[in-house]
Amino acid sequence: MVGRKARDKEIVKRELWRRCGMSELEKLDKAYDFILRKLVAGGDPPHYVDLAKAFGLSLEEGKALLHELMASGIPCWLAPGTDYIASFAPFNVQPTHYRISVDGIRKGYGQ
């Protein structure tokens, strides 16, 4: 069953890139930019539903894009057992000792 799940995820990933007409790297770059801009603008990270809507994807494809970005090696991660962004450099969703302000307005916490 594990092999089938991995194969199904790979199929969804390939279809995602094919439908968007972008390379995998371009898609990850745009997703990274989208998430970071949302954090700067409001201090809260977007959900994969927001990613799907912004890129014209199905919910499953939006979720796959989020997980692909999180697995890409950039300093970010999801809250354990969820699909919610917990940290996305330089922002951290949970309070830390490092407060971040953008244009003098408090926007959240740093990693």
Image: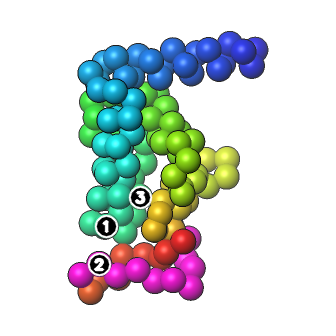
Mark 2 vs mark 3: in front:
2
Local SS, label 2:
strand
Query: Magenta span covers which residues?
Result: 93-103
Q: Residue at x 26, y 86 (%)?
A: 104
Residue at the spot of label 1: 40
Mark 1 vs mark 3: in front:
1
Residue at the spot of label 2: 102
Question: Residue 68: x, y in percent?
Answer: 51, 36
Q: Rate crowding at label 1 as few (under 14), some (14 to 19) or many (20 or more) other CA atoms within 10 Å.
A: some
Question: Which mark sits nearer the N-terminus, 1 or 3?
Answer: 1
Q: Rate crowding at label 2 as few (under 14), some (14 to 19) or many (20 or more) other CA atoms within 10 Å.
A: few
Question: Does the magenta segment cover residue 58?
Answer: no
How far apart in space, not on screen, are marks 2 and 1 (Cα)?
7 Å
Question: Residue 47: x, y in percent?
Answer: 43, 48
Q: Residue at x 38, y 35 (%)?
A: 25
Question: Which mark sits nearer the N-terminus, 2 or 1?
Answer: 1
Q: Is residue 86 visible?
A: yes
Residue at the spot of label 3: 45
Q: Residue at x 58, y 15 (%)?
A: 8
Local SS, label 1:
helix
Question: Is there a contact, CB below 8 Å, between mark 2 and mark 3?
Answer: no
Question: Residue 62: x, y in percent?
Answer: 41, 34
Q: Between 66 and 26, which is closer to the camera in this rendering?
A: 26
Which quarter of the rendered picture does the N terminus lie within? top right
How far apart in space, not on screen, are marks 1 and 3 (Cα)?
9 Å
Local SS, label 3:
loop
Q: Residue at x 37, y 69 (%)?
A: 43
Q: Is residue 48 above or below residue 8?
A: below
How far apart in space, not on screen, are marks 2 and 3 (Cα)?
15 Å
